[in-house]
Amino acid sequence: MSGYIKIDNVRKVFRKDDRDTVAIENISLEIGKNELVSILGPSGCGKTTVLRMIAGLVEPSGGEILVDGNKVTGPGPDRGMVFQDFALFPWRSVWKNVEFGLEVAGMPKAQRDEKVERYLEIVGLTDFADARVHELSGGMKQRVGIARAMVNNPKVVLMDEPFGSLDAQTRNIMQAGLIKILDKTDQTIVFVTHSVDEAVFLSDRIVILTKRPATIKEIINIPWPRPRDRASPEFTALRKRILTELEKENVMN
């Protein structure tokens, strides 16, 4: 597979109180264009650190990361990030939250209006364009966050447990909604989650990390098209196998 994102022998060491903690140990991974790749692993193993290094928010201690052939040296408009805690501006409307990045980039108003209208339609929030953040449900807030990340048309969308704080029913709805968004856009998505069910339901591939210092334990290709039947024997068997591998890592902690 031709790598749109290339993680080449990346290592990350954090230093605190004159002590070094190795979080990531020599990870190499290629992610193809338009793929949705999920990262799973034990709590505290460094999943979010990998995501933040791709975003350019954390610098690798060794190795390098490239996006579309360009070395990542810091944040850039080619990468958008969706956080678990929504990170919306409460004083701005839904429309104004989605529009924010386009304003900062200096895009003319007519173009901004066209793009914001399109992405609000994609995430199903056209009727809530003028609503304030406090008027929205958790799922709606997360849809605003997704629209805001995608409206700038980044090459890569990085999602850090975007549905982790939602109740089970809303989470399933958001997962189905993300699949619909994938059908209407061409972004590459890297998705960090603790949910094996979510990873199997959404992903083209799943990367399983070991306990810290994290290395790649296994990469699993998902052979079935989306949407997927969570109740099928094949889905259940794969979910069970992945859970078993994760439990092995947790037991060793």
Image: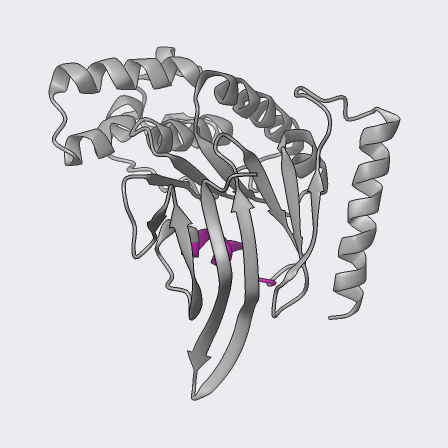
| Residue 72 inside the magenta-drawn segment | no
User: Compared to 61, does 80 lie above or below?
Assistant: above
User: Compared to 227, does 190 lie above or below?
Assistant: below
**Residue at horizontal 42 percent and vertical 16 percent from the top:** 122
Which range is magenta? Answer: 45-53
Residue 168, by quadrant, is top right
> In the displayed structure, does residue 24 sit left or right of residue 246?
left
> In the displayed structure, does residue 80 sit left or right of residue 201?
left
Q: Where does residue 156 sit, x and y in percent of width and height?
A: 41, 37
Q: Where does residue 222 sit, x and y in percent of width and height?
A: 71, 33
Residue furthest to the front: 2
| Position of the C terminus by quadrant | bottom right
Residue furthest to the bottom: 18
| Residue in the foreground of this view, choosing between 127 and 152 | 152
**Residue at horizontal 21 percent and vertical 16 percent from the top:** 113
In the rendered image, is residue 161 in sight?
no
In the rendered image, is residue 191 in sight?
yes
**Residue at horizontal 37 percent and vertical 29 percent from the top:** 150
**Residue at horizontal 60 percent and vertical 31 percent from the top:** 171
**Majority secondary structure in the magenta region:** helix
User: Compared to 54, does 32 lie above or below?
Assistant: above
| Residue 51 inside the magenta-drawn segment | yes
| Residue in the foreground of this view, choosing between 246 and 95 | 246
Q: Where does residue 37 sit, x and y in percent of width and height?
A: 57, 39
| Position of the N terminus by quadrant | top right
User: Compared to 51, does 220 lie above or below?
Assistant: above
Residue 27, by quadrant, is bottom right
> In the displayed structure, does residue 211 sit left or right of residue 32?
right
Q: Where does residue 50 sit, x and y in percent of width and height?
A: 50, 56
Q: How is the image coloured?
A: one colour
